[in-house]
Amino acid sequence: MFYMTLILCFVCSILITPMIKKLAFRLGATDKPNNRKVHEKIMPRMGGLVIYISFMLGILIMNPDSQYHLAIILGSVIIVATGILDDIFELSAKVKLFNQIAAALVVVLWGGVQVNFINLPFGGVLEFGVLAVPITIIWIVGVTNAINLIDGLDGLAAGVSSIALISISGMAIVMGDVYVMTIGFILLVSTLGFLFYNFYPAKIFMGDTGALFLGYMIAVLSLLGFKNVAFISFIIPVIILGVPMTDTIFAIIRRLVKKAPLSAPDKSHLHHCFLDLGYTHKQTVLLIYAISAMFGLTAFIFSLTTMWGSLLILTIILLAIELIVESVGLVDKNYRPLLNMMRANKYAKNR
């Protein structure tokens, strides 16, 4: 039953994409080229509706059981409605943020999905108390926007989200979490079916309908899988989401350095940087897929090692991220403290 449902969701996603494409043009949900975007012709968006319809079909068939289920689905309705309206009418950033917080509040306050505490590495428990609600909301809204920010190239957000879903669902199997595994795989195959039309050269964009929905679901699933666990374990979803979270964090740093508004769009995201380095559109997408897959694999290794091994892996990850950031110019072309230090040491040894 489970495998047949996955196949049905995948096929449904492929079959209804052309219909949603026609609907997007009819409703005016299109993306026009400008100096910040890489496509050169008007493209239909709202393709995330394909993912949502296929996903809901799987949910109705499987009817997964969890105390959080109704709240998660209701929150997804708010998110998808926001995405559809934004793809058609282009909502303001404040309205989108308000609706994202509303969806998060449904999951957190009504559904009861909260990170109440973490077990510290060297003993003891860190209770979040009254901060549990805002911390959980910040996580959901933050991850939702992180996926939205990387949706800048054909198939990029769908592919990176799929890799994250494979990692989260795989972890759920290891941890025996049937609900997260079921939801994760249904969402995965629904996304892969859409990716058939969304990969370069794309015939339709997922738009905010897809990016916000995928971000919201990945945020919630990662919370369900790793809430109220050891501090080291709580880092696992952060590693799984390494690419979108790194891009988002350094986008914020970049805007602070340049004294620009946090919501101001720019053309300096990770995919833009790879394009500037001379990689083609397709090469850039595949390269970021590979980086995402490495983060996912690292998360699995991280979960199986000892505490000291985890700290070593975490240190290596942070150094690798910093080197990538400096190499591609994710903050600024002149921001290269670690590379400059390495070059200075090499120069000193050669003297």
Image (cartoon, helix red, strand yellow):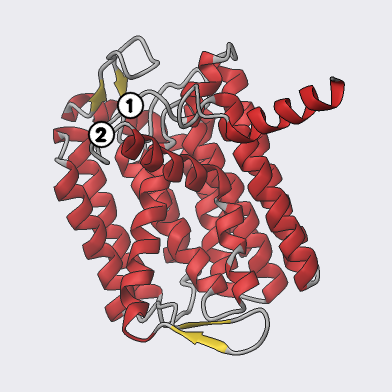
Q: Are marks 1 and 2 in contact (CB under 8 Å)?
A: yes
Query: Against 179, is 263 above or below?
Result: above
* Label 1 packing within 10 angstroms: few (<14), some (14-19), many (20+): some
- The image quadrant of residue 162 is top right
Picture coordinates of residue 16, whole percent (x, y) = 40, 37
Say which of 49 and 289 sits in front.
289
Res. 200 in view: yes
* Label 2 packing within 10 angstroms: few (<14), some (14-19), many (20+): few
Instruction: Tell me the tag on residue 120.
Output: none
Picture coordinates of residue 330, whole percent (x, y) = 49, 30
- The image quadrant of residue 309 is bottom right
Under circle 2, the secondary element is loop
Quadrant for the C terminus in the image: top right
Under circle 1, the secondary element is loop
> On the picture, is 280 further left or further right than 149?
right
Instruction: Tell me the tag on residue 266.
Output: 1
Disc 1 residue type?
Answer: Asp
Res. 57 in view: no
> On the picture, is 347 further left or further right than 112?
right
Residue found at x 27% / y 35%: 259
Give the alpha-carbon distance from disc 1 to disc 2, as whole Å: 10 Å
Query: Against 335, is 58 above or below?
Result: below
Nearer the observer, disc 1 or disc 2?
2
Quadrant for the N terminus in the image: bottom right
Residue found at x 28% / y 30%: 265
Disc 2 residue type?
Answer: Ala
Query: Against 74, is 265 above or below?
Result: above
Which residue carries the number 2 mark?
260
Q: Residue furthest bottom?
A: 124
Picture coordinates of residue 67, whole percent (x, y) = 42, 83
> Considering only order in the chain, which callout, 2 or 1, is on the residue closer to the N terminus?
2
